Image (cartoon, grey):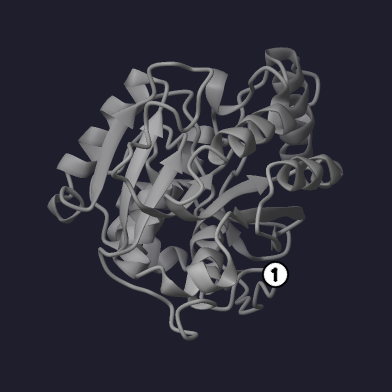
Amino acid sequence: MKAIDNSEKNSLHPRNLHRFRYDFELLISNCPELKNHVAINVHGIETIDFSDPKVVKMLNRALLQTYYDIQGWDIPANYLCPPIPGRADYIHYLADLLAETNNGIMPEGSSVLGLDIGTGANCIYPILGHAIYDWNFVGTDIDPKAIENCSKIIEANPKLIDAISLQQQTEARFIFKNIITPEDRFTFTICNPPFHASAEDANQSTVRKVSNLNPKEKKKTNPVLNFGGHNAELWCEGGEIGFVTQMIYESAKYPMQCLWFTTLVSKRENLSSIYKTLNKVNAASIKTIDMAQGQKTSRIVAWTFLTEAQQKTWKI
């Protein structure tokens, strides 16, 4: 027998549309293929097999179509399939951050321009940012296949064509170089950095995650990650701290061209080193915004080189 669970996910941002359990009846009405993958768990609650990457991708497609009017969203096999509620949280917290120097008003419209570092094949931050706040974006990635897939998503949704532009980063060792030009003025940068230091490290993490989701998979040494992800999406030399440190040093070369530089930081133990680096480059203001989705905790680190007076004169 199906139970009704209206419990609220208080850890998510108050404006997040996904604070309550998934309405599978509504989702199935928009994505009928999902019906065969919804089952009642031991608690009598409707759910899906979150250890199956194909089903997780199907859920994402249904969420994006139902709540954000995105048609035909898809990603190639083995590419990162992002959890929509957590990615929406990042966008909402960015809106709060921008409101602080905008007379408390969350800015909407194309005057807000975000730079998404490592947009992946899913293009999720630009999609959500435009759908929720009508912001414009530049999405960058080192992977041409990822850029190609983002182009397909944009072409399938005409309203995104003028709102999202894409640019391949041709030199993998750089983040902002080759991307930010002297004429550019970005309201913010957004990033979900690769947080493993090697492919082996990423695989070990996958083994732990999949065994937690599905104990039957515990003995597999090379399991399939439910949210996918490959190569540069999951790991880079130096891991999360190496990537974010590089980002900070590069950001100092464009101090007046971006209101807020931001990034996710998944490992709390990396914060002290990140703060030290930010102080080295003389960031004018540093903010840390805590986030949580289920049992996973994370945070956004934001920094700017603009004084408070300069921030207030930035036209949003």
Quarter holding the C terminus is: bottom left
The local crowd at label 1, few if under 14, some if 14 to 19, many if 20 or more residues have their Cα within 10 Å, is: some
The kind of secondary structure element at disc 1 is loop
In this view, the residue in front, 290 or 29, is: 290
Q: Is residue 3 above or below residue 42?
A: below
Horizontally, residue 290 falls left or right of residue 264, namely right
Tell me: residue 3, above or below residue 258: below
Residue 148 appears in which quarter of the rendering?
top left
Quarter holding the N terminus is: bottom right
Instruction: Name the image quarter holding residue 249.
Output: top right
Q: Position of residue 118 (x, y in %)?
A: 47, 34
Residue drawn at x 63%, y 76% is 5
Say which residue appears at 58% left-offset and 78% top-offset.
14
Q: Quadrant of residue 206?
A: top right
Name the spot of residue 123 as percent of width and height, x first: 37, 42
For the residue pair 289 and 294, the one nearer the viewer reads as 289
Residue 22 placement, left or right of 198: left
Q: Is residue 128 above or below residue 79?
A: below
Residue extending farthest to the left is 158
Residue 273, visible in the rendered structure: yes
Residue at 55% from the left image edge and 40% from the top image edge: 251
| Residue, disc 1 | 11
With respect to residue 188, does 16 lie above or below?
Answer: below
The image shows a total of numbered marks equal to: 1
How far across and down, in percent of the image, does residue 273 sit? Answer: 82, 40
> Is any atom of residue 230 visible in this view?
no
Query: Which amino acid type is marked by label 1?
Result: Ser
Q: Position of residue 257 (x, y in %)?
A: 42, 49
Q: Residue at x 49, y 17 (%)?
A: 172
Q: Is residue 75 left or right of residue 281?
A: left
